[in-house]
Amino acid sequence: MKEIDARKLSCPAPVLATKEAVENEQPKMINVLVDNEAAKQNVSRFLESQAYKVGVQAKGTDFLVTGTRDGIAVPAEKTVKVHEEGETQKIMVMIATDRIGFGDNELGLKLMISFVKTLKEMGSDLWRLVFVNNGVKLTINGSAVLDDLKGLAETGVHILVCGTCLMHFNLLEEKAVGETTNMLDIVTAMHLADKVINI
């Protein structure tokens, strides 16, 4: 049994501590104590990705995330893919704002709405959409592009929304599309992507 107290740790520290324990010790059972919803989701998702069966129990205002598994998970082989002409590539778009450019906020918002609505033109090359900082406001209830983002998600585009950012703006409960994520997931996605576009 491995126990980790990840309370008071900023994202992505709870996931990194869990990852280190799993990689170094391969425990059959691990308990991770966290103090916020984003950390609970992030640690749970990481453990599931490592073949753990995950349970969550509320402990006052904290959460105890428990992972159990029978054997040792074998990590997937990392491969470097060379794309042939016309072959699909993995493009990640990171959106760090809810408007494009500076000078006129109303114009900037219109441009961002137009940009998101046009993303579908990238077709199957669009692999990940990552929202950080003020960009997370595009993923909440009432967003002018919420239906467009849901449509992209339905086509298989994986949408990641920064949990620390949602918590900073007090919007965690308002998120209506995508997966609450952490910086480890974002950096991993950047590493796996063939191309990263920053907005």
Image (tube, rainbow, N blue to C red):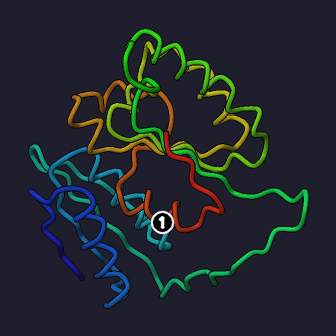
Q: Residue furthest bottom?
A: 25
Residue nearer the viewer, 76 or 169:
169
Q: Residue at x 46, y 16 (%)?
A: 109
**In-front residue for pair 5/147:** 147
Q: Position of residue 45 (x, y in %)?
A: 43, 58
Residue 83: quadrant of the picture: bottom right
- Residue 195 appears in which quarter of the rendering? bottom right
Secondary structure at numbered mark 1 = helix
Rendered-image quadrant of the N terminus? bottom left
Given residues 89 and 174, the one toward you in this image is 89
At which x and y percent is residue 50?
A: 47, 73
- From the viewer's perspective, tell me whether residue 70 is left or right of residue 85: left
> Residue lying farthest top?
106
What's the residue at 59%, 48% (across, down)? 128
Total marks shown come to 1
Kind of residue at disc 1: Thr
Which residue in the protein does label 1 denote?
Answer: 188
Query: How far across and down, in percent of the image, does residue 60 sit?
Result: 9, 45
* Residue at 28% in and 52% down: 40
Residue 39 vertical position relative to residue 112 in the rendered view, above or below: below
User: Which residue is rendered at x = 52% and y = 60% of the image?
Assistant: 189
Q: Residues within 10 Å of mark 1 (few under 14, many from 20)?
A: few
Q: Position of residue 107 (x, y in %)?
A: 47, 11
Q: Is residue 184 left or right of residue 196?
A: left
